[in-house]
Image (tube, rainbow, N blue to C red):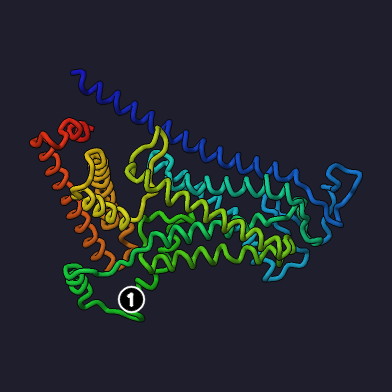
Amino acid sequence: SSWPKNRVARSLRSQDMAATRGQFCACWALWILVGLDQISHAATKSYCPLPWNANASLPHGIDLDANCPYGTRLEYFDVTVPTKLDAISRICIFWGIVPFAVIAFAVVDSIVRAVQLRGFGTRELAFLAFVLFMVAVNELVTKKLAKEARPPHSCNHTCGFPSGHSVMSIGFFTLMFLDAAYRVMPRVPLDFPSAKSHVQAMKGRAKTLFGYTLWEWLIGDFRAFVSVVPLTSAHTLNQLDFCSFACAWGILLLPVPFSRVILNDHTPSQVMVGSAVGLLQAALYFMVIRHTILPRMNHFLGKRIGCVLVHNFALPVYEVVSRCYVLLAREQDKDLSGEARLRTMQKLKECHTQLGWYIQQSEMQLTSCKSWFAFDEDHVLIRCERDKLRKLQADVAEHLTHRQHVCVVSSESGCSDCDETWSS
């Protein structure tokens, strides 16, 4: 009779925990916004007077209440709106707002994903941490050390070296490009069964230009805008999605440095240095994530890290498949020591779990709303890829079972150590 009560109690506790996680994720996103605001507020202390607002008798030698004769300043964006607006100036103002819009969309996307995952995603955390790192270094360190004024026709009060807009836009694009290029795996038939399924699926289909149907031409470019963060939510991209993804973000981000010069908010040298700084910071950040964080954390896919984080920043599927085959080959090496063999078997168990996550993602691609944005050949190749992953997972499971049997029946292979490994 107490079983229904216990079940209700557990349900209420899980709901309370989910609500607590949601509140924590919202507070986390709010903390990020407050941090960016504090960084921006601290950066305003690095004033560099211009001819129209210079006043040596005032603090910092600048009159903050002076009216700019060349236009108005957009608050929080550091964008000068010229007195005489033309079409080019309007477009440049839009590009001047783009980096901040990307950050705002990233925060919103983080909150939405946190509600869906019931935890803060590591993919969203990685991008927001990069934003905080980049803005903090540029605004709190570099600009305070350089103390170089903006062009005379700018309506901003702060120093302009290097260009913060250029740092953010080129940094975002570089991080996006490196991460997306790292995940490219051409989705084409590479064996006879896949090719046979592809031919059967494409039989009798009406094609237009370059072998695509009208629907595929309409959705092909739209698939690049599914992610509002410059880090793709897909663990693997095909060549078409990579090109669309890179072009879409390139159109949004690459013109930003040029717009800063056209609006007289920065000199060409400030923009060039800012772009170089953003590129370098993004490259270093990607190297750290690529070589230290992602490989070590991939076995946590879909699981909680602590009480709040949920790992959703996956390695490309081909890297996990390659790792499985390398571990299988290494485990069969007769010269491998007992301790090294145990470590290899433990990593194989982790690979077996990771393959299950990738298989689940393939199933979701075939059954969820994402299938509406997939080409006909994508469905065929996704099924073939899923079947290959299932076969590899079965091979890994069979090898693990065989090795466990060998450890149990052989007294010379360190049975106690093997038992501890399997029990863990």
Q: In the image as oriented, which residue stretches furthest toward the front?
A: 335
Using the image as rendered, state which of residue 234 and residue 368 is in the foreground: 234
Residue at the image position 38 percent from the left and 69 percent from the top: 240
Looking at the image, residue 34 sits to the left or right of residue 245; the answer is right
| Residue 81 seen by the camera | no
Quadrant location, the N terminus: top left
- Is 410 placed above or below 83 here? above
Quadrant location, the C terminus: top left
Using the image as rendered, state which of residue 321 and residue 37 is in the foreground: 321
Residue 99 percent coordinates (x, y): 59, 56
Classify mark 1: helix, strand or loop: loop
Q: Residues within 10 Å of mark 1 (few under 14, many from 20)?
A: some
- Is 373 placed above or below 339 here? below
Residue 245 percent coordinates (x, y): 45, 64
Q: In the image as oriented, which residue stretches furthest toward the right?
A: 57
Residue at the image position 36 percent from the left and 52 percent from the top: 315
Residue at the image position 57 percent from the left and 62 percent from the top: 253
Quarter of the view holding residue 263: bottom right
- Is 315 placed above or below 205 here? above
Looking at the image, residue 357 sits to the left or right of residue 267; the answer is left
Looking at the image, residue 303 sits to the left or right of residue 265; the answer is left
Question: Which residue bears the numbered disc 1?
Answer: 212
